[in-house]
Amino acid sequence: MISPGKTLGVLGGGQLGRMFAHAAERLGYRVHIYEPSTDSPAAEVSAHAVHAPYTDLAELEAFVRGCAAVTYEFENIPTGPLWQLENAAVYHPKWQVLEIAQNRLREKTWLRKNDFPHVPFAECEVGGDLAAAIRSIGLPCVVKTADFGYDGKGQLKVADEASLAKAVSSFQGHRAVVERWVDFKCELSVIVARTAAGVARSFPVAENIHTRHILDFSILPARVAPEIQDRARALAESIAERIGLVGLLAVELFLTDRGEILVNEMAPRPHNSGHWSLDACVTSQFEQHVRAVAGLPLGDVGMTAPAAVMVNILGDAWKWSGDRCVGEPDWAALLAEPRAHLHLYGKKEPRPGRKMGHFTVTAATPDAALELARRLKAAL
Ligand code: AMP
């Protein structure tokens, strides 16, 4: 066990690192952040920050040697340096988990090899025959870059011959994954924490609504049968065990009309769809992450309200004149609502599509929470 007072290191300095730092500091830990960019929401609230590239071995080594354990808030970190510094620190999770999750092709291949339900896919190497890969999966399908994709970046739906030709030209020079298009009933996610002793605990299942590929609303509990929730949580826990997770893992899922649960993506870190836990759960995902990494007993994951909805606040909510930002959202209605909790990440520059903050509302039912959330969002 890493006792309070010791230092926990985080690679990545975005809002997830910021909320991790808040939780760790409350438990008495010191948090050090390693983040290339100087505009860092996490560095702002941490005891110490290093701003250097992830590939700067000397800086990275000095950083990890100063921490009792190192974790991540961002999975797209080059694993080469971590592998070279494998013996310099304790990493939770280990870099091999990062390596699987940061590349769609490796992730899907891992799911297939380990017999976890996933969306059928075909791969296409650089210079390979993408049209043939698309035809092998059938239309409609979605083509995604194999590396470094998130929030729908680097993906294209292919529904007809015209979009097939477009995909072939726009994915030239990229390794791609072709996935069957899933007409899902809804999207779900489960966040699971696991300790080095092998104890795993998953949070209640979130139902997620995306708009333009970015998470818009997370609804808790998900409006699906308890049996589906149990299956989703069991699936996430068994993935965590098989991958040898220590820390936190978010598993994004599609629920099909036939009741199948398919894994879409995995992220070995806190997740946007778990932010509701800060305001409507006995233990937040960030505290749970700290507990898992530090080897403390895991906290209770019961909800403290019958229902909750989390809403992302993107830069789009700021006032714009063309591409010039001319004013901030109107916070009045949100701040006046006693069942709403506003979180802003301290980012200096709003941009369309950029996650600037979120808010969570609680209510007696998921539908009532969603209605309140939509109303407050519209009033921004
Ligand atoms: P991703 O970046 O893979 O998480 O995709 C972002 C969003 O695109 C998902 O949350 C879905 O809403 C949608 N999406 C991704 N893959 C598929 C698919 N195979 N079928 C249908 N929708 C998809």
Image (tube, rainbow, N blue to C red):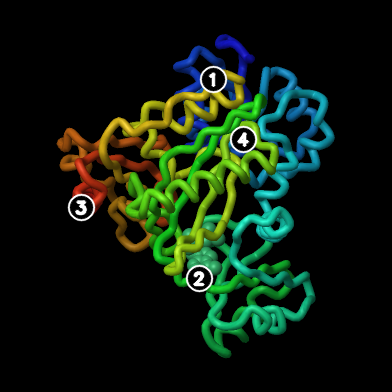
Q: Tell which circle, 3 or 1, labels the residue nearer the N-terminal end.
A: 1
Q: Is mark 2 on a helix, strand or loop?
A: loop
Q: For mark 1, what is the residue?
A: 297
- Cα separation, mark 1 vs mark 4, equals 20 Å
- Cα separation, mark 3 vs mark 1, equals 36 Å
Res 12 quadrant in image: top right
Assess whether mark 2 and mark 3 are in contact (beta carbons under 8 angstroms).
no
Percent position of residue 14, x then y: 52, 38
Q: For mark 4, what is the residue?
A: 72
| Residue sitting nearer the eye, 201 or 54 | 201
Assess whether mark 1 and mark 3 are in contact (beta carbons under 8 angstroms).
no
Q: Tell which circle, 3 or 2, labels the residue nearer the N-terminal end.
A: 2
Residues packed near mark 2 inside 10 Å, few (<14), some (14 to 19) or many (20 plus): some
Establish whether ligand 1 lies closer than 8 Å to the Cβ of label 2: yes
Establish whether ligand 1 lies closer than 8 Å to the Cβ of label 1: no
Assess whether mark 4 and mark 3 are in contact (beta carbons under 8 angstroms).
no
Q: Tell which circle, 1 or 4, labels the residue nearer the N-terminal end.
A: 4
Residues packed near mark 1 inside 10 Å, few (<14), some (14 to 19) or many (20 plus): some
Q: Tell which circle, 4 or 2, labels the residue nearer the N-terminal end.
A: 4
Instruction: State the residue at coordinates (74%, 20%).
Output: 65
Amino acid, disc 4 = Tyr
Instruction: State the residue at coordinates (53%, 38%).
Output: 192
Instruction: State the residue at coordinates (37%, 27%).
Output: 282
| Residue sitting nearer the eye, 334 or 159 | 159
- Cα separation, mark 4 vs mark 2, equals 30 Å
Q: For mark 2, what is the residue?
A: 182
Amino acid, disc 1 = Pro
Q: Does 189 sit above or below residue 182?
A: above
Q: What element carries label 4?
A: strand
- Cα separation, mark 3 vs mark 2, equals 27 Å
Percent position of residue 11, x then y: 63, 33
Q: Residue furthest front?
A: 227
